[in-house]
Amino acid sequence: MPRFCDVRFLPAVAVITLLLLAPALSLADPAAGIAPVADEDFYDNGRPPEAKVHLGRLLFFDKILSGNRNIACATCHHPTTGTSDAVSLSLGEGASGLGKDRRSNASSPLLGRVPRNAPALYFLGARAFERLNHDGRVEVDHRHTWPSGFWTPAREKLPQGLDSVLAAQALFPVLSPVEMAGHKGENPIATAVALDHLEGPTGAWGLLAARLQAIPEYVTLFKSAFPEITAAEDIRFVHAANAIAAFEATAFRPDDSPFDRYLRDRDPAHLTAAVRRGMDLFYGAAGCSGCHSGKFQTDQRFHAIAMPQIGPGKNDGWEQSYWQSTGFAGRLEDFGRYRVTFKNADKYRFRTPSLRNVELTGPWGHAGSFNRLEDVVRHHLDPTSSLESFRQDAADLPALGIVVEPTAEGSQLTYEAVNPKRMADYLRRDTWVQETPALRQPIAQANELPAVPLDDDEVEDLLAFLSSLTDPRSRDQSDLVPETVPSGLPVPD
């Protein structure tokens, strides 16, 4: 019975009616306030033009968008690995292969690991997702500060004409030296990025657009997808970003999970007994829905939950013990949302991820610290204790081969391979923050989640509910991989 209802002031008939209805008004349907996913939740009402989606699909898999023409969006967001890449921290520019099989190669050495886990792409075409990336650094600009309509690291340099925040996000992996661009001097795009030259025909985005303009098949496809394009020189990278976003929004919309079917007709037959128990816990005693709320299981906000920090971090803070111990430069902390807001309260806060298809998207955490879904669930139940007991074998970090480090030579920036005899010291960065009490303790102190006592059976029920959020169609989306792309470059498969 609702708490605000005092039966002392109700007629007898009403009291009897309420008592009869009481079981239905309790936790019989803990998801009662959640509406099913619908077309109107998405840009273009869930139906972007087919020509735009087709073009975006080819661009998503085409390595032509990387500085050295050796890595595509799909490399780290492949449909066969849960739209991520199945490892804790990706090997981007300078490696070859996919997922757990990806390795560095001598012809184009690595700049190191990508410092954060490659986020999954499911449902990011929905309007509810107004902030993207683990720290929300690409977001809708409701204050109309920038002409583009979006807050991003590019600020006023971000071009206008972007369809969505998902399209805005697509402009940035191509600029990252460690992800897709490569390092200064390797190629014109990487050099333009290093000089912070982004706009115009000779800026990084313009150079990428020029590559597309030079491929006749792409010119035909862009003309079909965008009425304003009548000649090759009309193609801008904004158009490519809009097409990629249209493809992602369409291809990665997993709205036929058992949970979705339940939301559509409220038939309990869609859910097993264990799933229903887990759903009661998720929306009840376990407190999961406090952050993982709504139809996409995310409040779209930022929280500090003492996630272990592994990998190279984001060069935050001023602690220099790693440099003092190894001689390698690098500040290895990651301050999360603080990097965007510069508010101390936002240190170690990261965006609440959607839980849709969550069992497919591991490893989990902003640094991919946990390689098993059960482990990350248990971390949420007692974050500080989990942080203290965390060990690196809970993660999945691919082996590094040849790695280059930036080196100043007079006024020139050069890159030299790390001496193999020093690789052991170089690799200590992977666990340095976690193993250094002075760096680990602030992460624990920022934790916002209280401990929740659940027994093993209840954890199993929670995992069963999380499994019900998986759309069976997402388990094998290899049909999305094209056989060829217009550039003629190999397709990541």
Image (cartoon, rainbow, N blue to C red):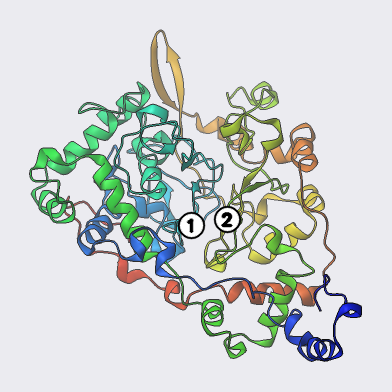
Q: What is the secondary structure assignment of the residue under circle 1?
A: loop
Image check: 430 left or right of 164? right
Say which of 90 and 108 sits in front: 90
Asked if disc 2 and disc 1 are in contact, CB closer than 8 Å, the reply is: yes
- To which residue does mark 2 refer? 353
Can you say whether 292 is above or below 207 in the image? below
Q: Position of residue 68 (x, y in %)?
A: 28, 38
Label 1 CA crowd tier, 10 Å (few <14, some 14–19, many 20+): many
Label 2 CA crowd tier, 10 Å (few <14, some 14–19, many 20+): many
Image check: 451 left or right of 293? right
Mark seen at residue 403: none
Image check: 214 left or right of 259? left
Q: CA distance from mark 2 to mark 1?
A: 9 Å
**Residue shown at 76% from the left, 80% from the top:** 26
- To which residue does mark 1 refer? 120
Tell me the amino acid under the disc marked 1.
Answer: Ala
Q: Position of residue 358 (x, y in %)?
A: 56, 65
Image check: 278 left or right of 480? right
Q: What is the secondary structure assignment of the residue under circle 2?
A: loop
Tell me the amino acid under the disc marked 2.
Answer: Pro
**Residue shown at 37% from the left, 24% from the top:** 194
Q: Position of residue 438 (x, y in %)?
A: 78, 32
- Image quadrant holding the C terminus, namely bottom left
The residue sitting at the top extreme is 410
> Can the viewer see residue 347?
no
Q: Position of residue 437 (x, y in %)?
A: 79, 35
The residue sitting at the right extreme is 8
> Can the viewer see residue 461?
yes
Of the image marks 2 and 1, the number of the one nearer the N terminus: 1
